[in-house]
Image (cartoon, helix red, strand yellow):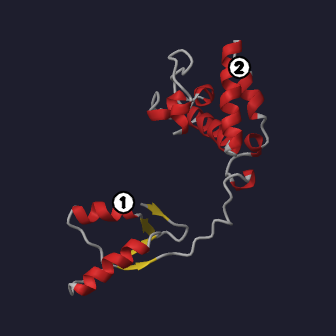
Amino acid sequence: MYISEFNEYIIEEEDLVTLMLQGVTPTKIVTTESKKLDQYNHFCKLFEITGIDYVVPVQSFDKFKPNDENNWHMPEQYKSMDVYHFLSSKCKTDEQLHRLEIEWQAFKLHNLIPLLKYMVYLVDTMRDGGIVWGVGRGSSVSSYILYLIGVHKVDSIKYDLDFKEFLR
């Protein structure tokens, strides 16, 4: 479930099922799915019970292009930073540089370099604000780049964690 740009709760299919299993059947929702709701409403009509009235908002993803750094709300110094240089300057051994290069190519292939810049900004902002965050969770700890940025505290090289786990 998330909030759209119009401050409406948009319910995903999984959230709707969870609500219904908890005994809550909404009568009007905003959702991104309609096909299964159409099927549900068809059976409700057959059994003469109230269905779910829904709205599928028109979503314009043209407004926000995740790979366009102009859409990331962060200071210019982070948008224009050479994040590869930032990361490589933290590497002390050839093994670390090799791992950085492997992961860098994967991030680059998926056009996620702006995300890395944002993560540097986010970590810096949390440090400056005295905000504490966890040591690491899930597959993110298999990324050495995220370790170098400071997103987590688990050295994936030291613990021989396979970066492919992060890509799943």
Dot 1 surroundings within 10 Å: few (below 14), some, or many (20 or more)? few
Residue 30 is at least partly visible in this image: yes
> Which residue has dot 2 on it?
97
Residue 133 is at least partly visible in this image: no
* Mark earlier in primary sequence (1, 2): 1
**As shown in the figure, which amino acid type bears the numbered disc 2?**
Leu
Q: Position of residue 45 (x, y in %)?
A: 27, 86
**As shown in the figure, which amino acid type bears the numbered disc 1?**
Glu
Residue at position x 52%, y 75% in the image: 57
Q: Position of residue 162 (x, y in %)?
A: 53, 25
Q: Quadrant of residue 52?
A: bottom left
**91 displayed left or right of 155:** right
> Which residue has dot 1 on it?
14
Dot 2 surroundings within 10 Å: few (below 14), some, or many (20 or more)? some
140, above or below 37, in the image: above
Mark 1 and mark 2: span between their CA atoms? 41 Å
Label at residue 62:
none
Residue at position x 47%, y 30% in the image: 136
138, above or below 99, in the image: below
